[in-house]
Amino acid sequence: MDAAHRHSIKVAFHIQPYKGRTDQSMHDNIRYIIDRYGKHAAFYRFRTSTGEVLPIFYIYDSYLTPSESWAELLTAKGSRSIRGTPYDGIFLALIVEERHKYDILASGFNGVYTYFASNGFSFGSSHQNWKAIKAFCDTNNLLFIPSVGPGYIDTAVRPWNNHNTRNRVNGRYYETSLQAALSIRPEIVTITSFNQWHEGTQIERAVPKKTVTRLYLDYQPNQPDHFLQLTRQWAETFNKEKDKWLM
């Protein structure tokens, strides 16, 4: 958190599934995170359309927990409700399949994100479905946060999964994803990922490198920071566009 603050970066938490993740354990996790880090200058808070300023929590594989359990934590009437308490926040569910949207609504989540960088891998990560998901979210007062990526290749860790590989095409895949995201006018866009090398979704600086067991992908013939430069350009475009949408 201190390092992030030195570089003017804010930190939000992405909570993975773990053995025994329940509404009760999540309640404890949220309390711990906010008690421990909530006052830190680098702790990210988001201003909602109603003017509230709340932390954001991304809940990965949220569909593994039944909506009745999430509702105990995330709805005002829940037995462990964090709503209206110092531990309230914006809780985002992962939308993988189309049917998940109804469970997400019943659970009391504030919105959804799509995570996967491979267009077509899941219902949620398919660009062609974003307009419909956004419409559903708008109707139900949910945030829709599309996740974009620069490409995808995870065959070093999942040799059977080559049908989900997506070539970077020197940055064109990334720009296509970003264009698809911006076209639905989202409030937030997430990027998968900064440095998830084993799934080939990293955008951090990269130089050619080869070990005995692995050839790392680089961005040649482009510069090592090619994907950071693209990210900067699109972030600037996104900010300008957002100003126009709000006028």
Image (spheres, rainbow, N blue to C red):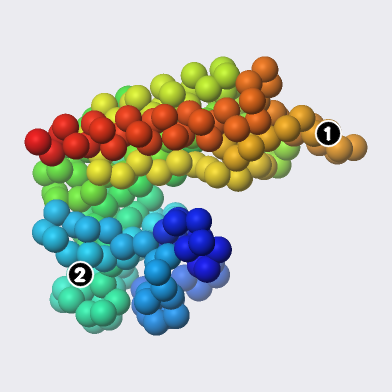
The mark lying in front, picked from 1 and 2, is 1
Q: Is residue 9 left or right of residue 50?
A: right
Sooner in the amino-acid sequence: mark 1 or mark 2 = 2
Quarter of the image for the C terminus: give it. Answer: top left
- Which residue is label 2 attached to? 75
- Amino acid type, mark 2: Thr
Q: Looking at the image, is 197 positioned above or below residue 244?
A: below
What whole-number distance in Å separates the C-alpha atoms at marks 1 and 2? 50 Å
**Residue occupying the far front of the picture:** 6
Q: Secondary structure at mark 2?
A: loop
State which quadrant residue 175 falls in. top left
Residue at 22%, 36% (x, y): give it. 242
Q: Is residue 96 visible?
A: no
Q: Check if mark 1's residue and mark 2's residue have beta carbons within 8 Å.
A: no
Residue type at the position of mark 1: Lys
Quadrant position of residue 123: top left
Q: Is residue 120 left or right of residue 46?
A: right
Which residue corresponds to the image point at 26% horizontal and 79% vertical from the top-left? 86
The secondary structure type at the circle numbered 1 is strand
The residue identified by callout 1 is: 210
Question: Is 147 situated left or right of 68 in this image?
Answer: right
